[in-house]
Every structure is written in structure tokens, then in C-alpha cells.
Amino acid sequence: MKDLAVNSSRGQMKVQQMAFVLIAIVLFFALAGILLLSLQTSSLKNTAENLRDERALQAAREIATTPEFSWEIDECRSCIDLDKAFLLKERQGYKDFWELSLLRIEKIYPEGEGECTKTNYPECGKITIVEKEDIFNAKSSFVSLCRYESSEKYYKCELGKILIAGEGLQ
């Protein structure tokens, strides 16, 4: 009888050891799965941010090629007619046309100073067409800013950028 009690307690001990080993294995794989899931979630967030940035840059390029801005003298896809952009600034109908919170064209080289007005155009630095209070993270794309120089009778192009921001782009 004593021999039977020793064997059954030894059997129970082996069963308990096996149960603990199985629990440890399950916990190990659960923790490894949680770690892998968190890494994939982090990667997914980065991918989503990159796609949003790409979409915003593409929207900036597309806006630059719309008939409202496009330079029609040469075959230039990234050229903006600065005279057209300046005239659009004065029109209230275009404030909600693109559903953006910011649409601005800035000169980079040669640098200009301040917002464009009728008195300082074309010796100014930026043309703000849309600017609302709730501006999100703005994205920009480089463009050529072209205009007709009437005093010297030639077309002049300068380096600039178009900035856009909007809730739909974020």
C-alpha cells in the first residue's frame, strides 16, 4: 500500500510539472504574439502617415496643374502662372473651391517680402489664396512661378513652392 501511495504522488507530481510547463509555453507564445502585434501596429501607423504625406504632396502637384494656376505658354507641368494666382486671391468664390484650410504660393528665389497686394506685386513674397483658422500640418511642393514681365517684354520664371493643408489631406 505504501508503494502505491508513493507511485501516485510521483505521478501527481509529474502531471503538475507538465501542467506548469504547458502554462509557461502558452504564456511565452502569448507574450511573443503581443510583441509581434505591437510591432505591426507601429509599422501600420508609420505607413499610414507616409501615405497621408504622399497624398498631400500629390494634391499640391494636382492643384498646381489646374487651369486656375497652370502656365500655358510652355509645356511645363509644375509651372504656376503667378498673375493668375494673384487674381484668384481677390476672388471670394475660390475660398471654398478646393476645401482646404490653407493654400499659399511662396517665392523661394529670388526672395520677396510680405503678402502680395496691388501695390507691391510682383515684388512680394507670398500669395495666400485660402487661409482658415483651423490649419493642420501643411505640405508643400516645389514649383516654378512664371509671369509676363511687361516692362521688358519677356516671360520670367522663379523658384517657388505651393503649400496646402486641409482636413481631408490629414
Image (tube, grey):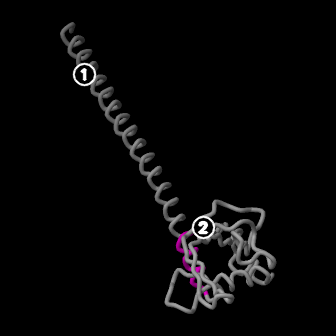
Amino acid beneath label 2: Ile
- Disc 1 crowd rating (10 Å Cα; few below 14, some 14-19, many 20+) is few
Numbered range of the magenta stretch? 56-66
Main SS, magenta residues:
helix
Q: Quadrant of residue 23?
A: top left
Q: Is residue 63 magenta?
A: yes
Q: Earlier in the sequence, mark 1 or mark 2?
A: 1
Q: Residue at the spot x=75%, y=79% of the render?
A: 89
Vertical position of residue 93 compared to residue 21: above or below: below
Amino acid beneath label 1: Lys
Left of 75 or right of it: where is 35?
left
Q: Residue at the spot x=49%, y=61% of the render?
A: 50
Task: Return the residue nearer the eye: 170 or 152.
Answer: 152
Q: Residue at the spot x=22%, y=11% of the render?
A: 6
Badge 1 is on which residue? 14
The reply to whether callout 1 and callout 2 are in contact (CB within 8 Å) is no
Left of 1 or right of it: where is 140?
right
Left of 160 or right of it: where is 7?
left
Task: Return the residue nearer the eye: 167 or 87.
Answer: 87
Q: Is residue 123 magenta?
A: no
Residue 108, numbered label: 2
- Does dot 2 land on a helix, a strand or a loop? strand
